[in-house]
Image: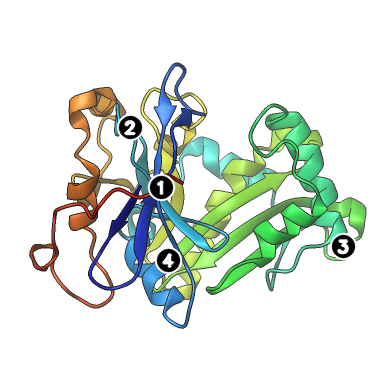
Amino acid sequence: MRHTLPLAPQFYVTAPQPCPYLDGRMERKLFTALQGEHAQRLNDTLSKQGFRRSQNVLYRPSCAECSACLSARIRVADFKPSRTQRKVLRRNANLTRNATSPWATEDQFALFRRYLDYRHATGGMADMDIFEFAAMIEETPIRSRVIEYSEGAKRGPADLAAVSLTDVFDDGLSMVYSFYDPDLVGRSLGTYLILDHVEIARSAGLPFVYLGYWVPGSKKMGYKAGFSGLEIYKGGEWQPIGDPADHQVELHPLSVDPIAEQVARISLPDGRSPKDRPTTLPPQGGKR
C-alpha cells in the first residue's frame, strides 16, 4: 500500500513477515527511496526521526501489533565508558583503524561470510553472495565510509579483524552494519567498534553516534542499553532511555498509531510542518 506526502518522496509499507527480534510477532516496515541530488538532506532529516538506511532505501519499523523497535543513539558529550568498556578499549589497543571509500573487497567478504556463519547462520542475510555484499557496501547515494580495523600497523588479508559500514550525517555517525572475526569473539569487537565510533565522532565535532534499533525484551539488542548517554526516539522526540524496563508498554497493540498518522507527522527537508500535510490515505494501491 502506498502513502504519499505532497512533495516527494513516496512512502510504502512492506508485507508482514516474522520479526527477527521478538518471537511470535510480525514485522512491517515503512520505507521510501533514497535517491537524487537531495538524498543526503533527506537521509539526514529522516534519520533524526528514527529511519535507517539500507543501500538506497530509508526505512522505519511500522508494525501492526507493537512499536517496540526504538531508534537509539549515543550523545557523545555525555558518554563515559564503563569499567568493562575501558577494558575492551585496552584489550584492542593494538588495532589500526583505516577509513576508506565504500568499496567492497574480497578480504571484507571473506570476513563477512565467517561472521555470518558464526552469528547469523539462519538469518535473512545468510545466503548473501559477493555481488549482494558489494551492493550492500557500494550502493549508497550519501556520504559513507568503510572503516576497517586490523592487527598491527601493516595489514595483510589475514590481519583484518573488523569492518563497519558507516554513514556520515550532519549531526553524527550511523553504524549501518558491522562485522568482525569470530575467532576474536573474546575481545568484544562489537562493543569496541561502537566505542571507537564515539571517539571518531568526538574528534570530528559530531554530537551523536546512531546505533540502529534498541528493542525492549530482545536479548539480541539488549547490549545497546549498556552505553551511557543513550537516548531513544519515542513519541516523536529523542529522550534519555532511562530504565529499560519502563518501555515494555511498547509491546502492546494499542501503542501503534495508524500508518496515515505516522506518515502525516514525518518532517521533510522542505521545512513544512505536519499540519500542512493531508492525513487521509490515497486510494489503495498494490502492496510491496
Badge 4 or badge 1: first in the primary sequence: 4
In this rendering, position of residue 181 left or right of residue 278: right
**Amino acid beneath label 3:** Arg
Labelled disc at residue 68: 2
User: Callout 2: helix, strand or loop?
Assistant: loop
Amino acid marked by disc 4: Gly
- Residue at (59%, 68%) from the top-left corner? 140
Front of the two marks 3 and 4 = 4
The amino acid type of the residue labelled 2 equals Ala
x, y percent for residue 176? 55, 54
Q: Of marks 3 and 2, which one's residue comes earlier in the chain?
A: 2
Label 1 to label 3, Cα distance in Å? 50 Å
The reply to whether residue 163 is in sight is: yes
Please name which of the two marks, 4 or 1, marks the residue nearer to the observer. 1
Q: Is residue 76 above or below residue 250?
A: below
**Disc 1 designates what residue?**
286
* In this view, the mark in front (4 or 2): 2
Mark 1: which amino acid? Gly
Q: Nearer the viewer, mark 1 or mark 3?
A: 1
In percent of width and height, residue 86 lies at 55, 44
1 and 3 marks in contact (CB < 8 Å): no
Choose the circle earlier in sequence order: 4 or 2.
Answer: 2
Q: Residues within 10 Å of mark 1 (few under 14, many from 20)?
A: few
Mark linked to residue 156:
none
- Residue 177 against residue 221 in the figure, above or below: below
N-terminal label among 1 and 2: 2
- The residue lying at 69 percent from left, 73 percent from top is 101
CA neighbours of label 2 inside 10 A, class few (<14), some (14 to 19), many (20+): many
**Residue shown at 74%/60% (left/top)?**
134
On the picture, is 95 further left or further right than 273? right
Q: Which residue is label 3 attached to? A: 155
In the picture of the structure, the residue carrying the numbered disc 4 is: 172
